[in-house]
Amino acid sequence: MNNKLYLLLLLPLFSCTLEGVKENDNDITDTSIVKAEIDTIDIEDENALKPDSLNGQANEMVFQRKDGLRIEWDIKNDDQIQPNDVVMVNYTARVAAGEVYDSNKELGEPVPLKPGIGMMIPGWEDGLLQMHIGDKGRIMIPNALAYGEDGYLTIVPPDADIIVDIEIVSRIKPLKLEDGVKVYKWKTAVDGAKPKKNQVITFDYFAYKKGKEAGIYDNSYQHAEPFSFKYKNDNVVDGLHIGMSVMKPGENAFIEIPSKVAYGSKGMVDLVPPNTDIVYDVRVSSIQ
């Protein structure tokens, strides 16, 4: 996967400002969403609603919440997405009654989403957690759960409702390592070797914090070059050493790190609160 293209794809998803990769000086205060082009929706009006009830019974293919969040399924399964999952999805996001503003179609392959880290706008995340592996459908998000009165740059107008056509392709099974570290590899490599002590690992990353203040707090793209450190011999959090122990060049993964092997009871300045778990979304370019 082309990292630059993937970065441009993810920009509308982020729930906070990415210094060094933002397009202007407006803060990105929310994220976006995910899906695939769903050819199975066969209706003349792409904004038309499915009936909420059939023959006097609730339509199980429709979910409607009081705050306006709505999901309509074309295919619905029973293996529900869980809060700590990483799922691979195809998606197309558009303004209701408007144009498409984001899609993974150009990439030609599914992209990963992880709930609970502030990666998506609220309506997208809440909708995703109502869905199941193998589902196809659309998440209809009211503006209050999307980009609100500010909109998103010049892409999403103020007070716009959002529609995300989405296909949940698969769930990534985590590798469970010591001290509770989990690695969700969403791109694997056949060749290459795992790191040995004192080898230099070079990678790009997005770093997220979990909890009430979930969101991105750091990324390598703001420095305009990948980050490097010596494996088992450098001043990065212990959990990152543990997570990188199973990575090869060319692999991508979410590395979920408990607070005890992250920043612990002290936290990290104003970026990560005390006793907060963190997640690195990494793309390893080399191990030398």
Image (cartoon, rainbow, N blue to C red):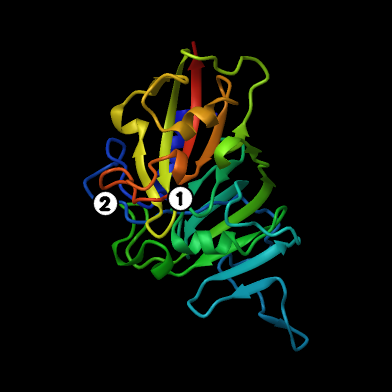
Tell me if mark 1 has few (under 14), some (14-19) or many (20+) residues whose alpha carbon lies within 10 angstroms of its own: many
Which quadrant would the N terminus be assigned to in this image? top right
The residue positioned 50% from the left and 75% from the top of the image is 68
x and y, in percent, of residue 236 in the image: 39, 29
Tell me if mark 2 has few (under 14), some (14-19) or many (20+) residues whose alpha carbon lies within 10 angstroms of its own: some
Check the image and name the residue furthest to the bottom: 56
Instruction: Report how far apart the C-alphas of labels 2 and 1 lie in the structure.
Output: 15 Å
Report the disc number at residue 119.
1
x and y, in percent, of residue 170 in the image: 69, 46
Q: Is residue 169 left or right of residue 6?
A: right
The residue positioned 62% from the left and 14% from the top of the image is 192
Please state which of residues 167 and 18 is positioned toward the viewer in this rendering: 18
Could you say whether the residue bearing mark 2 is in a helix, strand or loop?
A: loop
The residue positioned 49% from the left and 27% from the top of the image is 241
* Three-letter code, disc 2: Asp
Using the image, determine if residue 81 lies above or below residue 255: below
Report the disc number at residue 27.
2
Q: Quadrant of residue 107?
A: top right
Using the image, determine if residue 120 lies above or below residue 49: above
Numbered-mark total: 2
Q: Is residue 97 left or right of residue 274?
A: right
* Three-letter code, disc 1: Met
Please state which of residues 252 and 109 is positioned toward the viewer in this rendering: 252
x and y, in percent, of residue 281 in the image: 48, 37
Using the image, determine if residue 143 lies above or below residue 202: below
Please state which of residues 193 and 70 is positioned toward the viewer in this rendering: 193
Using the image, determine if residue 281 lies above or below residue 225: below
Query: Mark 2 or 1 closer to N-term?
Result: 2
The residue positioned 32% from the left and 64% from the top of the image is 158
Check the image and name the residue furthest to the top: 288
x and y, in percent, of residue 36 in the image: 61, 49
